Image: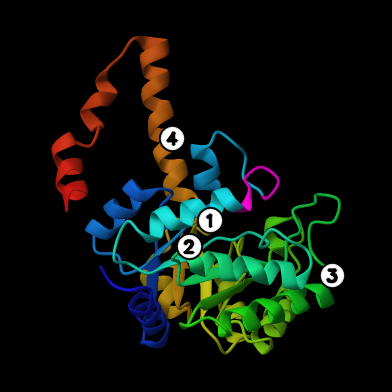
Amino acid sequence: MRTQLEKARAFRALHERPGVFVVPNPWDAGTAKLLASLGFEALATTSLGFASTLGRVDGTNAVSRSEVLDNCRMIAGATDLPVSADLENCYADAPAAAAETIRLAAEAGVVGGSIEDATGDSRQPIYDFALAVERVHAAVAMARALPFSFTLTARAENFLHGRPDLDDTIRRLQAFERAGADVLYAPGLRELATVRTVVASLKKPVNVLMSTLDPALTVRHLGEAGVKRISVGSALARLGLAAFLRGARALKDQGSFAWASEAVSSRELTHVFRE
């Protein structure tokens, strides 16, 4: 098993080499091992995917920081791959308290993580600009104090919270970049042209969430747009749940077992999980 330092170096190298790469999003140790068996080079956790395993809605008010950190520890320890964590708003409003979550995530074994400017409060869903930037500054300082190169991603959440203001989103990302974030991320973008505009406005690597874009787009399309890293968020988790519901509904409504022919074989799972 690679050390955390080795994983951190490998993750940083993916951002520094030419071209685009994909970080799929497992939600437990089993899905992490399955993704690793397919040859992916890094993984990222998913807050919605994990919340679904607990039967809860996504969000900082539904899943505790300690539960998320336990999930990070499980996924980080499941494979040799570097893992970046979805840390929501880092479970605190105050910059110093948010930065503490970065330290705890590193202790849990991940080598990267995100801080976002969404508050978790529907009455005021996005932090004021100055506070958002101060929070990133604090997270960067904590990341730099760690004994390895923690890759910090700063997220501007406007498009996921009913504020499709591209100018403000870019302003925030540029400020997060100046604050020292390693990767910039504006989840919820829906047009490739918008992605190009965001990438062109920044100097550091950009992560794009594919699940809100046209599914006809490919890794090649996003790479040509200048994207460095692609994640799918909760899409794989929701795909798995969709298959579960299709089978369960067919069983309940039709008394049908035809869905069982599409199930992964126990032999394939045993082959992956035994390694």
Instruction: For marks 4 and 3, give the CA distance.
Output: 37 Å
Instruction: For marks 1 and 2, give the CA distance.
Output: 6 Å
* Mark sitting earlier along the chain (1/3): 1
Q: Residues within 10 Å of mark 1 (few under 14, many from 20)?
A: many
- Residue 97 at x, y = what percent? 72, 67
Main SS, magenta residues: loop
Q: Nearer the viewer, mark 1 or mark 3?
A: 1
Instruction: For marks 3 and 2, give the CA distance.
Output: 30 Å
| Residue closest to the eye, 1 or 10 | 1
Which color scheme did the rendering employ for the protein? rainbow
Please tell me the numbered disc located at residue 108. 2
Please tell me the numbered disc located at residue 246. none
Q: Residues within 10 Å of mark 4 (few under 14, many from 20)?
A: few
Identify the residue at horizontal 86%, vertical 51% (top origin).
123
Identify the residue at horizontal 81%, vertical 73% (top origin).
131
Identify the residue at horizontal 75%, vertical 72% (top origin).
95
* Mark sitting earlier along the chain (2/4): 2
Contact, mark 1 vs mark 2 (Cβ under 8 Å): yes
Q: Is residue 114 visible?
A: no
Q: Which residue is mark 4?
A: 242
Instruction: For marks 2 and 4, give the CA distance.
Output: 30 Å
Is 94 placed above or below 65 here?
below
- Residue 25 at x, y = what percent? 43, 56
Q: Which residue is mark 1?
A: 69
Residue type indicated by callout 1 = Leu
